[in-house]
Image (cartoon, rainbow, N blue to C red):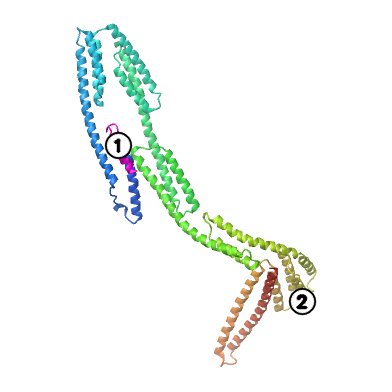
Amino acid sequence: MKTELIAKLEELLTKDAGEVANEVRALQKEYQKFWTLEFEKAKLAYVEGGGKAKEFEYPKQEEDIAFESLSEKFSKLKKENEAKQVAEQSKNLSIRQEIVSKIKDLSKLSDNVGVAIKMLQGLQTQWKETGAVSSHKYKDVQAEYSKAIEDFYYNLKIYRDLQEHDLKRNFENKTELIEKLKAVININNIKEAERLIKIYRNEWEEIGPVPNEKWEATKQSYKTALDDVYSKIKTHYNGLEEKKENNLKSKLVLIEKAKEIIASMENAGIKKWNDGTDQIIALQAEWKGAGRTTEKDNEKIWAEFRGICDSFFEKKKEFFATMNEKFAAARKFKNDLITKAEALQTSTDWQKTGLALIKLQDEWKKYPGNGDKEEPHLFQKFRKACNTFFDAKKAHFEGVDASFEDNLKVKEEILSKLNTYNESIGREELRAIAAEWNNAGMVPMKDKKRINEAFYAKLDELYDKMNINKEEKATLQFKTKIERMAGSENGFDLLRKESEFLKKISDEINNNIRTYDNNLGFFKHSKGSPLMKEFENKIELEKAKLAELKIKRDLVSEELNKIRETTKSNA
């Protein structure tokens, strides 16, 4: 880019410095913008590398030196061109002043009017062919020229008929020119209006005199038309400045909005970062449509807005870099879970495999997707493996349930018979009914909970009404409890937890017995000690509790074994 700008500047140096001055200034601004971008980028890299911004130095590149050299050469050429132009304008001014002086001399001629007119025409031609003068001298010398021409025609009093005709024609031309000036006010293109005014002013000065009696009115009409157009131009430029001020206010509001968006990104997630991106892009679009501001503020606020936007996208880049690391770790973990699930999907160990897959599903939930684009694909594979197993399990038990319909009918009859008994029923008869119930086999899953709860509730009710000792009643009711557990949908888990609980209680009792035994050691030489008797009683009590727990643990183990055997036979 720099090389292209240097080449363009070198090409412009081969042309007239005055004609290409605007193009050179545009190149210099473009080069400065490009250099500023390089400077900011190098400075940012220096700061990110650990340097301090105030210590940053940015040496000039070969292209910078070359461009500066060409710019200095242009400045020199421009000064030379301006000096030449000033000299040329000064020379042209002297020529024009000499022409005015000669015209004034012509107006004094009275003996040969024809020669005077011919000489005047020659001077007028010379005037038109003479180059431009400085703008601040042009008005005065042009006024002197016009006055000299007018004096010539009025003072010589020649060719009155021709003069009257010329005066009339000049009046018509100036009247027509005034109408053209009035029409300029309807032109919306201000640059075109300015161009036309310059042309019409030159034409006005070149048109000869008008009749004296019409001169003041014509001149006033011309001045009024000219003032009206200049008023419109001035209003236009004032409006542009006002619009630029409003644009500046609008852009300052956009800057504040961009700052608020960045501030709101603290601890933001993926969705908020994506929403913030849409908001920043929308602000950038608004910025482009807001128009230019005042020259002194335009570059400054653009640099600030651009810096804020760049800061947002840098923070977004850092955020997603961190998220990608987390995604990678989560993907690896989930791919491991998928591998495990796929290895289990064809298993027919319904109880064990079902629990294993549920555990894998719980592990999966510990790593939510949080916007990872791979998450839907991974979850689809994982769900497919799980569904393959659970669909097969469902189909299996639906087939099994169909074979349990006869068992359900048997248990419905047993329950109906049990509901006819009252407290007069004997223990052995209740045990026989319970055994008959257990021997009736499995029932469909949809009826399992309902019929078991009804049966065991009635069983508990009858046990409560029996005249039996506390221990036996507790054993019977505990057996009813575990049988109810076994009949539940998650019977295996409930029984396993009950077994673990009973073991924990047994371990605590054994610890108590060991403690009491140790304490008895202190009284082995003190036969008949009250404290020794107390510890012996405690040991006996704990052993009695241990015996009760053993009965319960055996009952639980028995039910667990039944479930295991049933699961194996169904497989």
Q: Is residue 479 magenta?
A: no
Quadrant holding the C terminus: bottom right
Q: Nearer the viewer, mark 1 or mark 2?
A: 1
**Could you tell me how many numbered marks the image carries?**
2
Q: Position of residue 489 (x, y in %)?
A: 68, 66
Q: Which residues are magenta?
A: 1-21
Three-letter amino acid code at the position of disc 1: Glu
517 is higher (above) or lower (below) than 183: below
Label 1 neighbourhood size at 10 Å, few (<14), some (14-19), many (20+)?
few
The answer to whether residue 67 is left or right of residue 251 is left
Q: Position of residue 235 (x, y in %)?
A: 37, 28
Q: Along the line of sight, which residue is nearer the eye, 308 or 417?
A: 308
Quadrant in which residue 417 is drawn: bottom right
For marks 1 and 2 on the same chain, the one whose residue lies earlier in the sequence:
1
Label 2 neighbourhood size at 10 Å, few (<14), some (14-19), many (20+)?
some
Q: Position of residue 523 (x, y in %)?
A: 56, 90
26 is higher (above) or lower (below) than 162: below
Q: Is residue 13 magenta?
A: yes
Is residue 366 among what the camera can see? Answer: no
For label 2, the residue is 427
Q: Along the line of sight, which residue is nearer the eye, 569 or 421?
A: 569
Quadrant in which residue 198 is drawn: top left
Q: Along the line of sight, which residue is nearer the eye, 445 or 17?
A: 17
Quadrant in which residue 293 is drawn: top left
- How many angstroms separate mark 1 from mark 2 (CA)? 120 Å
For label 1, the residue is 11
- Secondary structure of the residue carrying tag 2 is helix
The answer to whether residue 211 is left or right of residue 107 is right
